[in-house]
Amino acid sequence: MSEGIVKISEDRLLAYRKAEIAELAEAIALRFYNGSIIHPELIAKEQGITFSYNNYKDSFDGLLEHHSGRFHIYINLNRLRGENNPRIRYTFAHELGHYFIDEHRNALKSGKTPSHPSFNGLVAKNPVEREADYFASCLLMPEKLFRKQCFRRPLDPKLFEDLAKYFETSISSVIFRYFELNLFPMLIIKVINGLIDWKMPSKDFKYKYLPKKGAPVPPTTAAGEYFNIGKKYLEKQLLWPDDWFKDFNISKDEQLFEKCYYLSETSVMSVIWKREKGMR
Ligand SMILES: [Zn+2]
């Protein structure tokens, strides 16, 4: 089988699973929505799931345990200490995902998989963890409510901040949700130690010649300036498309915005989008 065929079937499976998980999570969210934010604890209580917040050293962020028909969620305050409330809410919602997604719960119940510890990260590699992450983001930021909050507002870092406040989620989970719902053409790119780690262009993102994984970040971009001269920007920056991309058909009046999120000393996540007429 050629690589291409494998990739297409994997994508389809992913899209199908995603749709299923989104439907499940959002039905639960809307059942509990009473005009304020979604509280994962209330959902757990209604399902008879017990939970505890405690210090469990560095072993996990969250954990769902099954014992003779009963489920318990552990949230590790040790690893999440000093973190804002959104991290704890997200971890809790992620553990609920392991409970509500049939395959995850049944695997736990049958003893086929031990209670698996979960760790927070930007993009989980394990598909089971990815499914629970996706569940968490759909539960805490249901599509209907999310779209309503974005109505008639252009992509802007201020919009992300407002959404994060409204849903009590982190800025990065808001950005991924916004991307997932394809609300505006954009590119998310992560740079570690000055090298491109990964990139996610939305389907309709205009530019196609993007820097490759492992390549040095272009020095005249906002992310590039951080790694080359240590300059940090709190505001979005206006750039020329050829600072980032090698496309041939760029016209002279095109401009981009780039907003850097400094995740740690060695890693930056940039959100990049084309400046449309009327965008300031
Ligand atoms: Zn997990």
Image (cartoon, rainbow, N blue to C red):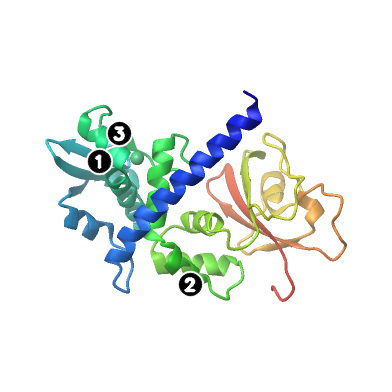
Q: According to the image, label 2 marks what residue?
A: 149
Dots 1 and 2: beta carbons under 8 Å?
no
Q: Position of residue 178 (x, y in %)?
A: 53, 59
Dividing the picture into quadrants, the one containing residue 86 is: bottom left
**In the current view of this chain or complex, which residue is farthest to the left?**
68
Find numbered disc 1 in the image and state the secondary structure of the residue it sits on.
strand
- Tell me the quarter of the picture where residue 139 sits: bottom left
Residue 27, above or below 105: below
Looking at marks 3 and 1 on the same chain, the residue that comes earlier in the sequence is marked by 1
Question: Is 185 situated above or below 78?
Answer: below
Left or right of 135? Residue 178 is right
Instruction: Name which of mark 1 and mark 2 comes first in the sequence.
Output: 1
Q: Who is closer to the viewer here, 157 or 99?
A: 99
Whether residue 221 sits left or right of residue 190 in the image: it is right
Within-10-Å neighbours for mark 1: few <14, some 14–19, many 20+: many
Q: In the displayed structure, would residue 68 be above or below residue 206?
A: above
